Image (cartoon, rainbow, N blue to C red):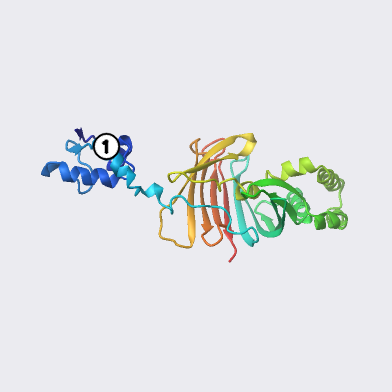
Amino acid sequence: MFHFIQEGDTIEHLATALGIENPKHLREYNNRTCLPEDLIDGVLIPGRKVSIPTLPEIERFNALNDAGFKSAAANPDLSWKSFKWKEQYEVGINYPLPSGASSSLKYRIRIEWYRSEHLYHYYKIYKTHTRLTTESKMSNLAIAVIEAINPLMVMLDQDGRLFKIKMSPEAGLNWPDEKARLLDLFPDPYAAQYIESFEYGLGQAEFFDKRMKQDLFIRHYFAPFRSAFHKGQSGFKLQAAKGVELQIGQQVKPGEDTELIQLEQFSHIPGQYEAQLDLAVATNVIDSMHIRLGGETAEAFTTLDVNRIK
């Protein structure tokens, strides 16, 4: 049997359509059985023919298990090698403003393993050195309040998935002094009202957990992307802005870097989510993240850049 090559055909697309896992077998089969003028030595030329193998021959090709998507490199185990680690990151966020302009937020994150018990792992997260390109009195107050409750306590399950966020014991003990300091720094009734409202939220564990999980860094750093791969593909669900749930696919980016696993991630809704994550091979801890989040228009997108401090 033969297939007459059409404009735009590739050996990879034809192999996929025929169910041949490794395209090289289709090329080799064709070159063994075709006429001299139909030999494939590069791109497919429209008007020429490609020999089509029989089903038993296709099954024999696939039984070799030599397709790239079946390799160990294309199907990594992303589980942390150990839960006992600590890292520091520089974080940068660029986001659109209602005016059509954009603003940026930068800060430093420190994550430290605290303890493990009852199949859960606890980490302290410190957010410091926060700065905005468009500062205001209220934005400075919001930054000061968030940094006043360092560190947060993050609770993960055995698979590294985010379970709960709460105040750490030391943040709770330090809060009265921090509150007094904030009231001195921002001595006006609006600031006092903001601080009192924030303090009320600290006492509502469920509300606090939900609010902290909306943090862009936390939401993506602890996203459930460590799921198992199958035939070079993996996927997970991600809660995006405004309650929209995205189905995210991911695959390993081919490369020669032996120290990093490079992941490419994409959304089932085009333009809503694109990301590259680099994980250290030695630990499976994130080395860097570069994420682009779609907005209401093509121009109104948010970017998150995270780089490990080495």
At x 66% / y 59%, what residue is drawn? 108
Q: Residues within 10 Å of mark 1 (few under 14, many from 20)?
A: few
At x 12% / y 43%, what residue is drawn? 37
Picture coordinates of residue 115 (x, y %)?
Answer: 72, 58
Q: Is residue 26 left or right of residue 184?
A: left
On screen, residue 156 above or below 260: above
Q: Is residue 192 left or right of residue 163?
A: right
Q: Nearer the viewer, residue 148 or 162?
A: 162
Task: Pick the quarter of the image with the N terminus.
Answer: top left
Q: Is residue 65 left or right of residue 183?
A: left
Q: Circle 1 is placed at which residue position?
A: 56
Amino acid residing under circle 1 = Pro
Looking at the image, which residue sits at the far left?
36
Q: Quadrant of residue 208?
A: top right
The secondary element bearing badge 1 is classed as helix
Picture coordinates of residue 26 (x, y %)?
Answer: 25, 43
On screen, residue 178 above or below 214: below
Picture coordinates of residue 134 (x, y %)?
Answer: 67, 51
Q: Is residue 290 visible?
A: yes
Q: Is residue 8 visible?
A: no
Count of marks, rendered view: 1
Task: Pick the quarter of the image with the C terminus.
Answer: bottom right
Q: Is residue 154 left or right of residue 292?
A: right
Picture coordinates of residue 288 (x, y %)?
Answer: 55, 56
At x 82% / y 45%, what residue is drawn? 194
